[in-house]
Image (tube, helix red, strand yellow):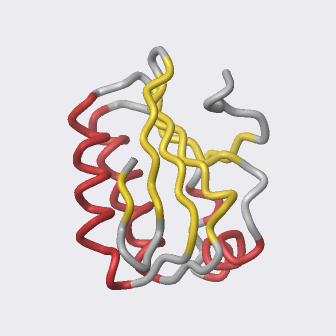
Amino acid sequence: MHGFPDGPKVLVTRLDETLLITVSGDTDADDADDFAAVWEAAHETGPTLTAVDLSAVGFADSMLLNALLEARSRHRAAGRPMVLLGPLPPGVHRLLSLSGVLEHFTIVENGPTQAG
């Protein structure tokens, strides 16, 4: 588990051919470098699918938006799917919706979990 002082917690779990990235806590611009490292590690592992669980994110701003857009772009370029696990918390849903990018993400209501 990657823990960032006074910031979000990110748990990266490999489930067969799925990489599950679970983010919890508040995210902001101070976390950008840490998120870049997590996305880089996810990109390098090359799983068939990356699933991002944002259900425990409290606060999200443009840093998280940019991180998700960058990850989506890299996955598309590599021909690998990336999904967001829903339902999204209200703040994340609002951020993606108001920025006009919500429809660019695949959101699945029942995705992989650490329990299986």
Numbered disc total:
0
Q: Is residue 58 left or right of residue 30?
A: right
Image location (x, y in percent) of residue 100? 60, 75
Q: Is residue 69 above or below residue 77?
A: below
The image quadrant of residue 60 is: bottom right
Which residue is rendered at x = 50% and y = 37% of the image? 20
Question: In the image, residue 30 lies at what x, y percent?
Answer: 32, 84
Residue 5 sits above or below residue 79 on the image: below
Q: Quadrant of the C terminus?
A: top right
- Please tell me which residue is depicted at 34% across the width and 75% down the height of the picture: 31
Left or right placement of residue 91 versus residue 51 in this view = right
Q: Quadrant of residue 13?
A: top left
Q: Residue at x 47, y 61 (%)?
A: 9
On screen, 82 above or below 58? above
Vertical comparison of 14 with 90: above or below: above
Could you tell whether 50 is left or right of 32 in the image? right
| Depth order, front residue of 8/44 | 8
Q: Quadrant of residue 113?
A: top right
Relative placement, left or right, of 31 versus 83 is left
Residue furthest top in the image: 16
Residue ID at (61%, 57%): 54
